[in-house]
Amino acid sequence: MKLFFGLVFILVGVLLLFGFFTANLWANVLDNFIAVWPVIFIFIGLSVMSNIRSLRWLNVVNGVLIVLFVLFLFFWRWDIGWMGPLQEYTLPAISLRENEKEVKIIFRAASLDVEFAAQSAEDPLIQGTYFSHAQNLVLKQSENVITIDFPREHAVTLTKNYKKKIKMVLPRQYSYQIVIESGTARFFSSFEDNPFSRVEINTAIGTIDSRFKRTEFPIAYVIKSAIGNVDITLPKDTPYFTDIRAVFRTIDLQGSQTRKEEETPISIRVESAIVRGKIAVSEGE
């Protein structure tokens, strides 16, 4: 058994040495663990039974299963899973109030990828699609506050797939506050004109991948997570304020930074045990 635990530590060490421990990898590990965590009781049971002299060979079986379990956590992808590929469903159309220009969207899920795109038309309508193994999205709206929820299943089995993906098209005449409350989350956006006033991610493992070329109002990025990954590209010659609090940080801060939040319309706050990534300023127009 000591041999197999030694192999596990060697594997983790190699992954750390070569920089494979990104937020996306940790998110994948957490997703996989949620799906198969009861197998730990099997390991304990085999370990107890292996104390019987005639069943000591179970030590070898248990060790092999532990190594396979660790490999599964790191390398199995849930894009397919045991239920086939994720299915695409149409997001219910969300009609916004035209006399209010602030919109707040709250997402809740066990594991979620959210991607935003701009809408060419000026209709006050949010549209999009989501990807899941079931048509299980719950949408609630109170004026311009929208809550999108994927209720948790009662049981956790190998046949459940907790990964959800949403692609949303946003009307350009509004400013948006985005809040994601999830076990793992990835926020992606790429715009000419920034539509967000606030992007907040409250997760165990969170990623922000965002870039824009212009903004007409202040924007605040906030990540509160155990592990955070940041990849933000700001408009050319734009100063920004950062408040990054982390035990371990590997983050490349490029461009001009300010010491006071009031001096710039762009602020980036990260509270995380581990944070990595970069904040850059675009070189082009």
Image (cartoon, rainbow, N blue to C red):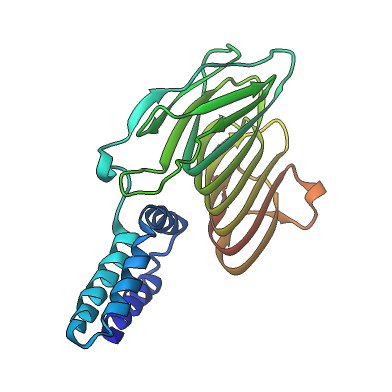
State the image coordinates of residue 189 (x, y, percent, origin top left).
51, 37
Q: Compared with residue 188, is residue 49 higher up or lower down, i.e. above or below?
A: below
Numbered circles on residues, count: 0
Q: Quadrant of residue 147?
A: top right
State the image coordinates of residue 168 (x, y, percent, origin top left).
50, 27
| Outermost residue toward the bottom in this view | 53
State the image coordinates of residue 190 (x, y, percent, origin top left).
51, 35
Query: From the viewer's perspective, is 192 left or right of 256?
Result: left
In the foreground, 184 or 136: 136
In the foreground, 39 or 127: 39
Residue lying at 58% horizontally and 20% vertically, measured from the top left: 171
Q: Compared with residue 215, is residue 246 higher up or lower down, i.e. above or below?
A: below
State the image coordinates of residue 72 (x, y, percent, origin top left).
29, 60
In the foreground, 193 or 85: 85
Quadrant where the image shows the C terminus: top right
Residue lying at 39% horizontally and 32% vertically, measured from the top left: 131
In the foreground, 179 or 1: 1
Residue lying at 28% horizontally and 83% vertically, measured from the top left: 1
Q: Compared with residue 130, is residue 273 higher up or lower down, i.e. above or below?
A: below
Residue 254 seen in the current view: no
Query: From the viewer's perspective, is 181 left or right of 67?
Result: right
Residue 5 seen in the current view: yes
Q: Quadrant of residue 154?
A: top left
Residue lying at 76% horizontally and 46% vertically, measured from the top left: 264
Q: Quadrant of residue 126?
A: top right
